[in-house]
Image (tube, rainbow, N blue to C red):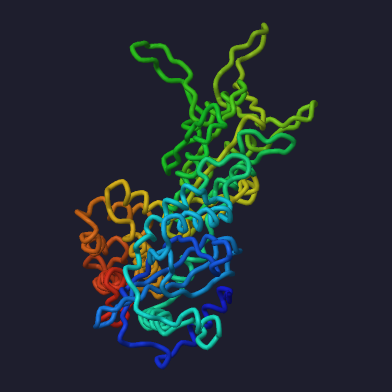
Amino acid sequence: MRYFTLDEMREAIGRVTRSDIDPSYTIPGSHTVLYFPFPEGPNTPAFPAIGAFWKMTNAQGKQHVVGICRRMDKPKDDGIFPICGPAFMMGAWDAPTAERRITEAVAKLPRGLTEAQFRAEITSSVGFAIGDGPCSFWRDYNRGSRELGCKHVASAVFQVTQGGSVEDVLGAINENPTPAAPVVAGDPDHELAEVFSRVCPPERKGRRKFPVMVQGEYSGGKTVAARSFGDCGGFDAVVEAHGHAGIEAVDFLGGMLPLEGDKKLAWVDGPVTEAFRRAARGQKTLLIVDEILRVPSRERSIFLTSLSPARKKDGSNVYRLRTGRPIMPTEEGMMPTMEMVEAPETNLSIIATTNIGPGYDVEEGDPAEGSRWHRVNYSAGPAKLTAVLKEECAAIGFNKRIVAKLISFRTNVAKLRKDGEAKLVPCLRELIRALHISDDEADVPTTLKAMAHTWVGLDTDGPNAAQVTAVEEAVEAAFTGRARRTPAPVAAP
């Protein structure tokens, strides 16, 4: 069986012309991403595959289900192939055969994708293809007489290229499931879990741990990933510090506060001191500093020395934090001193999160501060967005096939932003909100149109009208396939 690399498939799609297609067949505006087991032949084991599929129909009611797919047991950018009328989706296998093929595919699942997840995903694939007319796909594909196998596949990709770009299609199938963390995985589906487990796990014998700073776009799942890692079961305590522009160092460290109903003052630990103290007492502790770069840089200077471990005579490393808590002298003639908490590096893991770049109210600091952190740039890919949105759909009883349309809408607006026709790209938090405030699946496009002003620039009179229209048409393109009606608007100042 022939396979394409990602670049080869992109080039093959680009070579399709009007003479290669059957214009009587039409496709909906967006694809559906599905998992399925697929064998190369009747006597070869099945492998796990992911595909972007379209249901094509003509005026006589004949239907063909076509897709651009990828073997999930292959590296990214490889193992890509077209298909028309996949047997599993057509219900062509009896129950024993289907189970055998699924079991074969499960044996080849990539790291990070469990059997339970794969089986849950393929439930959407069963019955997706209702019926197919006759097609010579396999004969023509194996002989090489048609590069993409048949006129139905050619028709689908040609229509996609005429209405926009195939990049969201290729991106969707090329997104590998994230490998599970080799040591500890708070969330096996999240690619940050592996970074955390390598750099700042609860326990790392023979190797040092380092503080991690995750930086990226808003609502990308950074904080959720850190919290999930904290819930992995390896930590005795998880302490959160919430950053904002009004934070002062004492808010992190702690201070003397009046006790309730008492005129006396007592020391109360701030979150950073609490984390250090717990680690000093032998607890495996995770400190999460959320939105760290929103804290003024002068207030973040408490981390400069405290995140520079000191080497003790026994060869161990410790973090030292001067908290500001007064310690009364035990020797005559001595003055009060400030408390120093000494936390073994082996007991303290630290994860900070932040947005970064123009448009965010952050202070990025200097190289000395940056060197204290193992920095990770993160942006949630289509696979992660899809997984989270499917969970939300399941929670509210929506058909999860709408998720592909939401991802397509987000891709459309991203292109608008690149062309200066929108200010922002819909984030995961906003897409979840659109689902929850919609009455049903049919109401989601209406909700997104009502939210269009969220992603556009402002004029003196309010949201830029041309950009609002462009975003509304991005909704139409994703949910109905209707082409854009208006010319590209001028970007808002």
Question: Residue drawn 57% across and 32% down?
Answer: 234
Q: Quadrant of the C terminus?
A: bottom left
* Residue 52 in the image: above or below residue 159: above
Residue 258: name its quadrant. top left
Q: Which of these two is toward me, 336 or 255? A: 255
Q: Position of residue 347 (x, y in %)?
A: 63, 29
* Residue 27 in the image: above or below residue 446: below
Residue 388 lies left or right of residue 26; in this view the side is: right
Question: Residue drawn 30% across and 86% down?
Answer: 24
Q: Position of residue 437 (x, y in %)?
A: 23, 52
Question: Residue drawn 43% across and 72% down?
Answer: 67
Q: Position of residue 272 (x, y in %)?
A: 53, 31
Residue 25: name its quadrant. bottom left
Q: Position of residue 237 (x, y in %)?
A: 52, 28
* Residue 18 in the image: above or below residue 400: below
Q: How many marks?
A: 0
Question: Residue drawn 38% across and 67% down?
Answer: 90
Q: Quadrant of the N terminus?
A: bottom right
Residue extending furthest top? 332
Q: Which of these two is toward me, 166 or 366? A: 166
Q: Which of these two is toward me, 106 or 282? A: 106
